[in-house]
Image: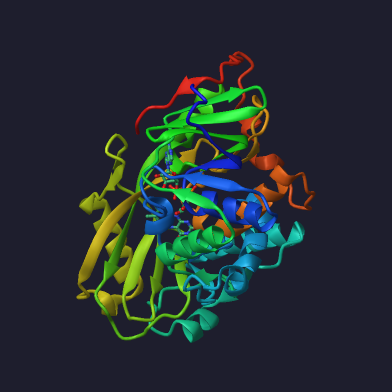
Amino acid sequence: MSESSSVGSDVLVIGGGIHGLSTALHLAVAGVQVTVLEAEYCGRHASGVNAGGVRTLGRHVAEIPLALASRELWYQLPELLGDDGGFVASGQLKLAETPAELDECRQRVQQLNALGFDHEVLIDREQVLEWVPTVARHVVGGIWVKDDGYAVPYRTVTAVRLAAQKLGVTVLENTPAQAIEQKGTRWQVRTANGVHQAEHLVVTAGAWSGRLAAAVGEPVPVHPEGLMLMVTHRVAPFCTPVLGATGRALSFKQFANGTVVIGGKLVGSVDFAARHGEVEMDRLSTSARTVTDLFPHLRHLGVNRVWAGVEAFTADDLPVIGRSGKASRLSYSFGFCGSGFQMGPGTGKRLAQEILGETSPISLAPFSIQRFAAPAAQTLNFASTIGQH
Ligand SMILES: Cc1cc2nc3c(=O)[nH]c(=O)nc-3n(C[C@H](O)[C@H](O)[C@H](O)COP(=O)(O)OP(=O)(O)OC[C@H]3O[C@@H](n4cnc5c(N)ncnc54)[C@H](O)[C@@H]3O)c2cc1C
């Protein structure tokens, strides 16, 4: 790559979703000069079109310390960003519809308690009915997390971007990274508008990150899925917490304006080349049925809009966060498997700490890219072209 027209920063971030922008923000707080390259516009993909769930409930045990740290930051967004991202501390409730499901919930809470976590609490049928009086009478209890909630995704991502820009971060939209190369100690990223270079490169390109990791000889079993959501017409307030279910896919919340957002990792399809997700109405109708089973009074409620966003899923359902195992001064944060919006604030802060060489009690070891390293894949070719998509 020619260096003639290159622009330099301390850190280059590829991808302007919540993870890239949050990492950039926390680096800028420490005085680092950061440039974010975004292929389309910030928040265009998963970070701007998700269900807004701020959920520590039901997390993989390895994710809990980071998710709890991230949740603390959700409460501090007004000080950090000057905007709360529409965060509402509504609590989240996972319903058990049968005694067997309630047993499953009980075992989960016992397992967490044994590990020293007490944020998930088992509740009985009476408590569920007290908090959600309109729910169907067959519900037998559930798990309650009082400090979880929900936020408004595009508003949150925009607030993170604006706060980062205020601290001096340069955000270049419509600027896809076309090729990356490490020359000596510096990274060079080629775009249609010239070459950008920096001491450190951060890959937060969501579902497209696998290609960048492969380009440095670190293939990751990550694939894109189109996750679907629907939003209903307005209805009188009937449910304050965010609801999930134990035995079937559901994530459900009523916003203050009366609309209900229904999701729960519902997989549609994805046109990766065209960079968008597509809705599969037959699968979406299964989810609508779950909602009317639990809230029969909604059976005539109209659906306003449906959509699908592109999300990155890894083979073991855990994200990749931390340093490259192959190249120096390269970090990753991607593959959040349908639950990365909540993790955005905390993961950005934690990754920035790691890049700055600061210590933290939160280990990133479970998220290391090296867990996927195959002894045979040892090619050390860092000069590579990334596909357009
Ligand atoms: C429908 C849906 C519902 C969800 N619901 C929830 C929820 O309720 N709660 C929750 O916690 N999580 C939820 N998630 C998951 C969450 O949205 C994601 O895990 C999170 O937003 C991922 O953020 P990201 O920054 O890693 O990726 P993204 O938001 O996808 O951002 C990556 C960015 O990188 C850019 N990019 C890609 N390639 C390049 C390149 N070569 N050069 C420059 N830029 C590039 C893309 O254009 C994109 O803007 C949901 C996801 C979806 C799709």
Task: State the quadrant of the C terminus.
Answer: top left
Q: How is the image coloured?
A: rainbow
Q: Is residue 336 left or right of residue 62?
A: left
Q: Residue at x 62, y 48 (%)?
A: 33
Q: Position of residue 89 (x, y in %)?
A: 54, 76
- Choose between 134 and 179: the one closer to the eye: 179
Numbered marks: total: 0
Q: Position of residue 384 (x, y in %)?
A: 48, 21
Q: Position of residue 322 (x, y in %)?
A: 65, 40
- Choose between 9 and 89: the one closer to the eye: 9
Residue 323 seen = yes
Q: Is residue 86 above or below residue 354?
A: below
- Choose between 97 and 204: the one closer to the eye: 204
Residue 320 seen = no
Q: Is residue 338 above or below residue 325?
A: below
Q: Residue at x 51, y 66 (%)?
A: 99
Q: Residue at x 28, y 64 (%)?
A: 289
Q: Is residue 27 above or below residue 128?
A: above
- Choose between 10 and 65: the one closer to the eye: 10
Q: Residue at x 32, y 37 (%)?
A: 272
Q: Position of residue 129 (x, y in %)?
A: 47, 83
